[in-house]
Image (cartoon, helix red, strand yellow):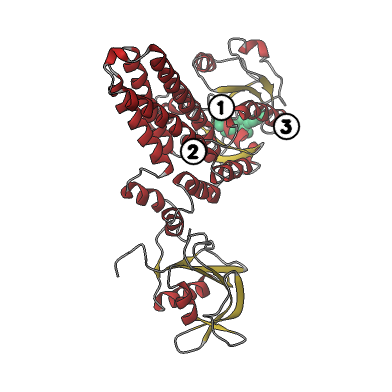
Amino acid sequence: MMRGERDTISQIATPPGAGGIGIVRVSGADALHVARAVFRPARGGRLEGIEPYTARYGHIVAADGTVIDECVLLYMRAPHSYTGEDTAELQCHGGTLVLREVLLRTWEAGARPAEAGEFTKRAFLNGRLDLSRAEGVMELISAKSARAVRAARERMAGALAEKIAGIRTRLLGAIAHIEAGIDFPEDDIPEARTGALAADIAAASADVARLLEGADAGRILREGMKTVIVGRPNVGKSSLLNALLGMERAIVTDVPGTTRDVIEEQIVIEGIPLRLLDTAGLRAAEDAVEQIGVARTQRHLADAELVLAVFDGAAPLTPEDEDLIVRLRNCAAEMIILCNKEDRDSVLTAADFSMLDAPVLVISAQAGTGLDDLRRAIAEIVRRMEGDLGDGALPNVERETEALRRAAEHLRTAQETLAADMGTDFVSIDLRAAYEILGEILGETADTDLIDKIFSEFCIGK
Ligand code: GDP
């Protein structure tokens, strides 16, 4: 069968694994027909007359009439369902095998397997959601922290979509403005009109720039704040990572340089996920394997958002430590200096790090002292970022950020063209381009390949 957009589709909508309830969702014009073929109401009677938004109790039965599972059937009628189509939800027991059998029955009865994201794609195609809101659904499903959940909800509610629609309206006004004036010879356009046009473009440009600023915050919520633990071998980086995680993940040994690979773990502080990376130290390594680790550390340092720089507080600074301090001076990330091993006699003080503009904390990764202060310091940094995390109008996906960048580029060109007095029809070309690109974010001007690609990244059953 052709994979048409009109086929009735079905898929298990609940996550894999055993659960109390598992749901097979059937969507499409034949949803009720498929349900009728596989479902036998406990009280007899026919399913045809079922009122939308009501439930029926009964059984899923095989073609030969044997019972496969108990089931509560929920019926939703187009267009008032998630997909905008007729939808039957078969709520069964949550065992993987049982659900699989129920699903197979729906396929036997005429539904075809739904592809990844196909339910949400239909919701989009039926005008139930714009692309930005659809991506909010995906984010909500994969959200790793409470705050990411909130951002995803706001996106589903259309925070970003509304901002972008506002910018587009403004651009449309500017384009209309130009079209109206284009019949006039160049030098007849009154100054005042050009001035208003310039102001409009500048405002649109500023709005796009603001959305782009939110892109980093959006990514942090989605992927976590990239937190790099650095320090020369044996200062206690792995011990710190373990202490923060409260579990043994990194291998702690006495041999310098054993943490050769970068280890990544996640913790959540103040609702923000932190991606913790323990690195192989920055020392000038002879050993090839370790050298790779060192290069990687450099790279991680370059795009870290938070650096936890660990020093052995019980030993004077070594040349390697000094070298690290110099590197840290050039690092743009937020930073916390940690003097570890406070259970031993401390020789380092805050004065040793006066070159760095960062808080210095004394801790013992092994004894677990000072870790609360560290959490508080991290929370403080997270709170400082709060302002940026703002109102949920965060471009969260690479696609959107990239589109915003292209739109910003066109708006900049438009401004330059206008300033250089090169003719407003050229300005119009760039404004139109920006208008179209912003439309892509909402899915209005997106082509089908792009739409297919976006929805294919969803999980099966969504
Ligand atoms: P890394 O190479 O920087 O990852 O350091 P490790 O975490 O592997 O620790 C190196 C050594 O220092 C191990 O023997 C740890 O047990 C020890 N160590 C780590 N933290 C502390 C601490 O707070 N106090 C003391 N006394 N020893 C520590």
Who is closer to the viewer here, 148 or 433?
433
**Image depth: mark 2 or mark 3 in front:** 2
Q: Is mark 2 on a helix, strand or loop?
A: loop
How far, Cα to Cα, is label 1 from label 3? 17 Å
Residue 250, percent across and down?
A: 55, 40
Rendered residue at 60%/14% (across/down): 357
Residue annotated with mark 3: 372
Three-letter code, disc 2: Asn
Who is closer to the viewer here, 149 or 98?
149
CB contact under 8 Å: marks 2 and 3: no
The mark that comes first in sequence, 1 or 2, is 1
How far, Cα to Cα, is label 1 from label 2? 20 Å
Three-letter code, disc 1: Leu
The mark that comes first in sequence, 2 or 3, is 3
**Image depth: mark 1 or mark 2 in front:** 2
Residue 108's disc number: none
Residue annotated with mark 1: 306
Quadrant containing ligand 1: top right
Three-letter code, disc 3: Asp
Q: In this view, does 26 lie above or below 374?
A: below
Residue annotated with mark 2: 396
Residue 99, percent across and down?
A: 51, 72
The mark that comes first in sequence, 1 or 3, is 1
Q: Is mark 1 on a helix, strand or loop?
A: strand
Q: In the rendered view of the protein, which quadrant contains the N terminus?
A: bottom left
Q: Is mark 3 on a helix, strand or loop?
A: helix
Q: In this view, does 4 lie above or below 348?
A: below
Residue 17, percent across and down?
A: 54, 64
